[in-house]
Amino acid sequence: MSTVLYVVQIVVAVGLLILVHELGHFLTAKWFGVRVRKFAMGMGPPIVKWQRGDTEYSLRPIPIGGFVDLAGEHPEAEGADDPKALWRRPAWQRIVIFSAGVVMNALLAIVLFSAAFLIGVNVIAPVAGEILPGSPAEKAGIRAGDRILALGVAGQEPTPIQAFDDLMYAVTLENAGTEFTIAVERPADDAAEPVRKTFLVKSFRPEGSLGPMFGINVPQDTVLAKMLTTSPAYQAGLEVGDRILAVDGKPVTFLHQAAEALEQAPAGPVVLTIERKGREQDLRIDPAELKEYRYGLAPPTGVEKVLPDSPAEKAGIRKGDRIVQAGEVRWPTPSEVSEVVQAAGAGPGAPGVNLVLERGGERVEVTCRVAMMDAEDGQKPMIGLAMAGAVGDPVQIGQVEAGGAADLAGLRPGDIILSVGPDGKMPGDWNDVVAESRRAGTEPGAPVAVTVERGSQVVETTLAPDAVPYERFTLEGIAAKPLYVALPRIYNPLAAAGEGLKRTRLWFGRIYTSLAQMVRGQMSTQTVGGPVLIVQASLAIAEQGLGTLMTFWGMLGVSLAVLNFLPLPPFDGGHVLFAIIAKIKGSHVSLKVQTAFWAAGWVMVGLLILLIMWQDISRLM
């Protein structure tokens, strides 16, 4: 029933955003005496329509828009001879009419934000979750569990941080390499008062990230949201919805604390204190009674990055290459490549390292010199590569454990995986292989059908994983949700309205700055979401209460206002642009020219919508 309620809330919110926007155009057009021929909610053929005065009102089935049809928008258009035609109104009135939808969206955002603070708002806690190894945050000394108090560009006055989102936007909306001052409150190891610390942290943008960051992940709650059927937690009897309260009597608030407590606990049985359906209970878990399913295979080692002016770059090694052989080692792991390089040694008399690479389905042989290069623990013989598992397309087997499940199934290093699972699914990347092998609903440890390509042969086999008892209990294979906390509720309507206005201005600034960041290449277009992502995010946020959902829709209202005011056809900003041009030149731009621009604009918008929806669906899958 809660999901049904959330869907109703989403439908009402979408309808409200569209209604308010179109109502802005409608009311101002009526105010200036322009004939409104149609006022439609939704797109597609009318489901219900009725006539009142000069205007036909209708409800339409596709809830992604709406429109107001004004008589005579151009002197050459249909209805241009109507005395109430839009083109007969002065330029400033036309600009007001075209801008009214955007203004109404901004006003609605203020109302939504204000009402939200009266009702009560939950936000993701401003606490550092997992700290990425080697990130600027780790190097600066920030720890998981630090509560973030304030943040600002170095040399400027820091701004108080109320939510993790505030931290994220403050960092992503500045260029990578910007130095920040960050003030945190760190819980003491004993019962003493928390310690306040200030750090200088420089943002960075690692390859593949959506934008600049510190390397601080979102804090995770200890409520289990998802579990693989093969996970230790599922086997131990934990259920989705359980909240972990303590590990061997040690209280935990965040998921990373629970994981760390389990790592620090002695190997063997462990006691989890959990809350299930409002009741607290202890769950004793013996890892020896749980099974770890090992498939005995791993992806090949791939080149993630080639350092500029390094021996690797000079040898012609490229990002995306797969390492087939390093020295005498076939299909080596990253650590084995490093061992071969260090064994070769650096210096004028050193022989260098022979590598066999796979690039675009072809083998490439190179000889790479070795140089002494800076590492975290001093200088070492290196060639200037960053390596990781090559998990993308083609999905290939790199390492096969001798005597393991993959070896017994006849799989070999270099095999290309064509399909996996009973349905013969073609994997898009290595994660698909793992997911299909361990997917929910499959009996844990059940054999998996695998088809591979080996040279010119196609080999079909069955992969039966080894069931090995765990040495210690871990939270591998589970997912949790962000940890939310409540902001102080505002009971004074005037104070709430002030906060609503402040939040609206903040989001206008964030969105315009985000667009500028995308243009400069500092932020990925992957951050943009469409209808699929909006519904998905709405359903997740709705769990945090109506006030929190209203802040999300207030942000969407601002986004809609910004999008619609871009000076491009077919947006409202495009209409305003043509009205300004007409005022400057003293006559309207010809209908033929406007129609061409509008047609091109609609084609671009259509392609953009398809691209965003494909991006949303790919992200969801």
Image (spheres, rainbow, N blue to C red):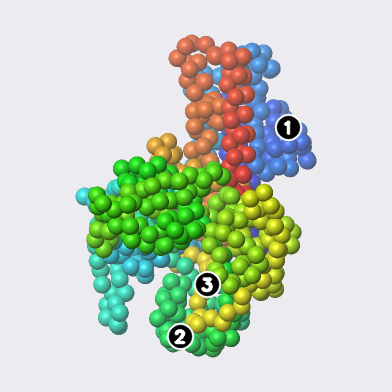
Residue 246 horizontal side relative to residue 98, left or right? left
Dot 2: element: loop
For disc 3, the neighbor class at 10 Å (few under 14, some 14 to 19, many from 20) is few
Q: State the CA–CA distance, disc 2 to disc 1.
A: 74 Å
Q: Residue furthest top?
A: 586
Looking at the picture, how far across and down is residue 603, in whole percent? Answer: 62, 29
Q: Residue at x 64, y 25 (%)?
A: 70
Of pointers 2 and 1, the one earlier in the residue sequence: 1
Q: State the CA–CA distance, disc 2 to disc 3.
A: 16 Å
Q: State the CA–CA distance, disc 3 to disc 1.
A: 59 Å
Callout 3 amino acid? Glu
Q: Quarter of the image for the C terminus: give it.
A: bottom right
Looking at the picture, how far across and down is residue 384, in whole percent? Answer: 34, 50
Q: Looking at the image, which is closer to me, 355 or 104?
A: 355
Q: Quarter of the image for the N terminus: give it.
A: bottom right
Residues under numbered marks 2 and 1 in contact, where contact means CB atoms less than 8 Å apart:
no
Whether residue 187 is visible here, answered yes or no, is yes
Residue 476, label in figure: 3
Of pointers 2 and 3, the one earlier in the residue sequence: 2
Dot 1: element: strand
Residue 56, label in figure: 1
Provide the residue designation for mark 2. Answer: 267
Of pointers 3 and 1, the one earlier in the residue sequence: 1
